[in-house]
Image (cartoon, rainbow, N blue to C red):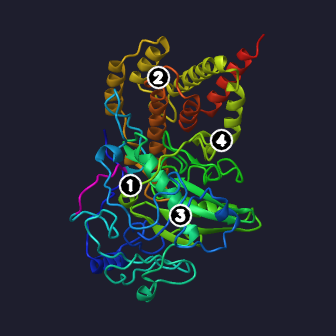
Amino acid sequence: MGGGGQNLVPEFISSEESAAASAASAPHVGGGAVPPPQAIPPSVSVPNPQAPFFSQNPAVAVPASTTPGAGPWAPGAAGPLPAAPVDSGHVSGGSAGPMGGAPMMGGGMAAPMTSGGGPTEPYSMPGSGGGTSTPTTPVASSSGPSQASAAPPSGGAPLIATSAGGAAGAASAASTEEPDHYMRQAIAVLSALVRATADSGLSVHPCWAVGIADVIGGTYAVIASSAGDGGYIPPGVVLPITARLAIYDPSLPRGWAGDRFLGWQHPADVIEGYSAEIRDRLYRFDIRATATNDPSPRRPRCGGSWMQVDTLSILRRAADPINPNDGQYQHRLKATDELLWSRLQTLVDAKPELRQQRSRSLAVAITDAVMGGAAESRNSLPPLALPCDEKLWEAVKSGSTTDEHWRAWLSESNTARELPETHQPLDLDDSTVSQNARLFYGHHYRSARVAELLHCWHPAIHADVADAIYSGLTAGFPDEIARAIEDVNRRSTKP
C-alpha cells in the first residue's frame, strides 16, 4: 500500500537526553527546537468551545472545577485521565465492513498503534494509561524562538508556557501551570478531530493544528490539517459550527495560499500563514492559543500560548458520542465552500418523496462528471482515475455491484495508487525540488480523492451527495461539479 507518513511514536529517551537532543536538533523551517509532545494534564477540564461563555467572555478566568459540556468537543470530565487504552481496530479506522478495509486515501501520518507502555511509549501523565511518567521539556515563550530548557521536577505537570513569559529558568515555579481557557478550547477541538479521524477509515491520518482566534465579536477556532492544501477534512469528520478552516476562511480571498501548503505536513505553519494574511484585514485579530498533534512541529510565530499534544493521550481519554445533526456542527463541505453547500441545500430541499431521487440523480451526475475529467491526463501525468475505477463506476451505475466487486477494486486500487505522503515537499520555498514535490503530491492526493468519491457509493446505492461533491471538489474538478449541478437543476425545474 505504499509508504509515507511520519513516525508517531519516537524512540523514548530520558528527560536529560531529551533536553540535549532538543537543543541540538534543527527545526524543519526556522524557529527553535521543539520539546517532545505532552499528554493532556490530568487536572485540566477541557471546555466545550461551543459554549457562549467562552466566546462572549474571553477575558474571564475559568474555574478549575468547570464541568465540560457533552460531545467530543468536551473530551472527558475533570480529574485524572482514565486508563482506557483504545483497541487497535479503533485507532486504525474502525470496522472495515464487507470490503475488508478502506481505500488508500492518504492523510498525513501513520495511524497510531497502541501499546501497554515500554521503551517506545511517549510521555504520559500519571493516570492517563501510559507506562512511563518521565517529565517533558517545557515549551518556550512566544517572545522569541523556542529554546530547550530544563525539565520540570519528576512527577510535576508539563510546563505550558504562554506569551506572558518565558519558560527558561522558570521550571520549578511554573511546573504546575495549567492551560488557560483559550488553550483548553484548542485542546477540545484538537482532541475531537483526532478521535474522529481515527474513525474515518483513512489508512494514513492527518495531523491537526487548532488556533483560537480572538476578534472583536468574540473567539472562534481556526483549523488546519496536514493533508491536501492544508484544509482537507476526512470522511465523517464534522467541525464546530463556529469553526473556520484556515485555507477556506470566507474572510480571505479564495485560494489565498495557492499551493504553498500543498503536501505540507506541519499544520501549525498554516495557522501562522493564516494569521499573517488576515491580521491586516481585521481591526483586531489575535491568536490566543495553538495546539497540534504534529509529532515534529515548529512553534508558529503568531503569538499566544502553544502546546504539542500527544496523539495517544487523546485517544486514551474517554469522550461522549456526538449527534452531527443537532445544529452544533457543520459538514466538511459547508466549512470548505459555504456557497456551494447552500446551493446544494436549495436543490435537494424538496418533498420527502422526491428528495432521495433528486439526491441520487445529483450524486450520479457529479460522479459521472468527475470520472470523465479524471480519465484525462494533466500536466503530462497519468490520469487520476485508474482503469479499475472506471470499471467499478460502470458497475455501480448499472446496479450490479457486489462485495466481490468492491474487494477487487480495493485491492487493485491500493496496489496501483501511491500514498501522497511519499512525495511530500520538505520546504515551503519555490525551488524546483519543492515545486516538483508539490506537483507529484498533488497528483496522488487528487487520485486518492477520486477513490474517496467512489467509496461514497459503498455499500448503499445512494451516495451522500455532500460527500460526493466534497470528494470531487478536492479532486480538482469544481467546474465539472458546477456544470453537473446546473444540469440537474435545469432538468428538475422543467414542467
Q: Is residue 432 visible?
A: no
Q: Where's the N terminus, which quadrant?
A: top left
**Residue bearing the label numbered 2:** 460
State the separation of the CA atoms marked 3 and 1: 20 Å
In primary-sequence order, the first of circles 4 and 2 is: 4
As drawn, 194 above or below 127: above
In primary-sequence order, the first of circles 2 and 1 is: 1
Mark identifier at residue 337: 4
- 485 or 462, which is in the foreground? 462
Q: Is residue 167 left or right of residue 256?
A: left
The picture places residue 482, in percent across and down from the top left corner, at 67, 29
Q: Is residue 25 left or right of residue 282?
A: left
Amino acid type indicated by mark 3: Thr
| Label 4 environment density (alpha carbons within 10 Å; few <14, some 14–19, many ≥20) | some
State the separation of the CA atoms marked 1 and 4: 30 Å
The picture places residue 236, in percent across and down from the top left corner, at 49, 40
Amino acid type indicated by mark 2: Ala
Q: Which residues are magenta?
A: 110-117
The picture places residue 397, in percent across and down from the top left corner, at 49, 15
Amino acid type indicated by mark 4: Asp
